Image (cartoon, rainbow, N blue to C red):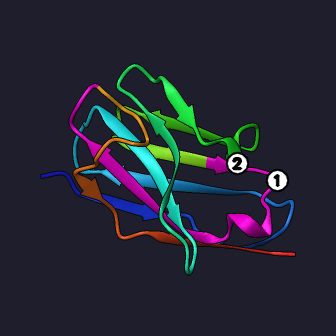
Amino acid sequence: QVQLVESGGGSVQAGGSLRLSCAASGFIDCMAWFRQAPGKKREGVVSIGYDSNTTYTDAVKGRFTVSKDNAKNTLYLRMDTLKPEDTAMYYCAARPYLLCRLSDSYNYWGQGTQVTVSS
């Protein structure tokens, strides 16, 4: 069982930046960030595999950057040039498999951290 704890959310004006963190209780091959806005389906933001191969959803390409510190079992999401449409609850997720796509099923989820972007 892997536990995931997110932090770093908050409120920011459009154009601003935030960095989210996700601390995992152990190493796991595939990690990802998802988000869910009120009244909308959850969507994948970015996944990162054991080999640091990444897949971003088109809406955040060029603005968001994922990274991980394997020594600390921590995943990060740097979000720049934030837009009001980025407002959502952001969730960290993980799966113990080499295949690491946003469309895959994820076994472990964090509790979420809220990001609010005002215009």
Of helix, strand and loop, which one carries label 1?
Answer: loop
**Element carrying mark 2:** helix
User: Quick one: label 2, few (<14), some, or many (20+) residues within 10 Å?
Assistant: few
Q: Please state which of the two labelled residues, at mark 2 or mark 1, is closer to the viewer.
A: 2
Task: Measuring from the top left, give residue 109's x and y in whole percent.
Answer: 30, 59
Is 64 in front, or is 24? 64
Residues 74 and 64: in front is 64
Residue 72 visible to the viewer:
no
Q: Is residue 113 above or below residue 51?
A: below
Q: Amino acid at mark 2?
A: Ala
Amino acid, disc 1: Thr
- Note whether residue 54 is visible: yes
Taking the spot 22% from the left edge, 43% from the top edge, the residue there is 26
For marks 2 and 1 on the same chain, the one whose residue lies earlier in the sequence: 2
User: How far across and down, in percent of the image, does residue 97 sit?
Assistant: 23, 31
Determine which of the numbered discs, if any, sits on residue 81 in the image. 1
The stretch of residues the image draws in magenta is 78-98
| Nearer to me, 84 or 114 | 84
| Residue 38 included in the magenta stretch of the image | no
Compared to residue 86, the image places residue 51 above or below, namely above
In this image, 102 relative to 19: left or right?
A: left
Furthest-left residue in view? 1
Q: How many marks?
A: 2
10 relative to 59, above or below: below
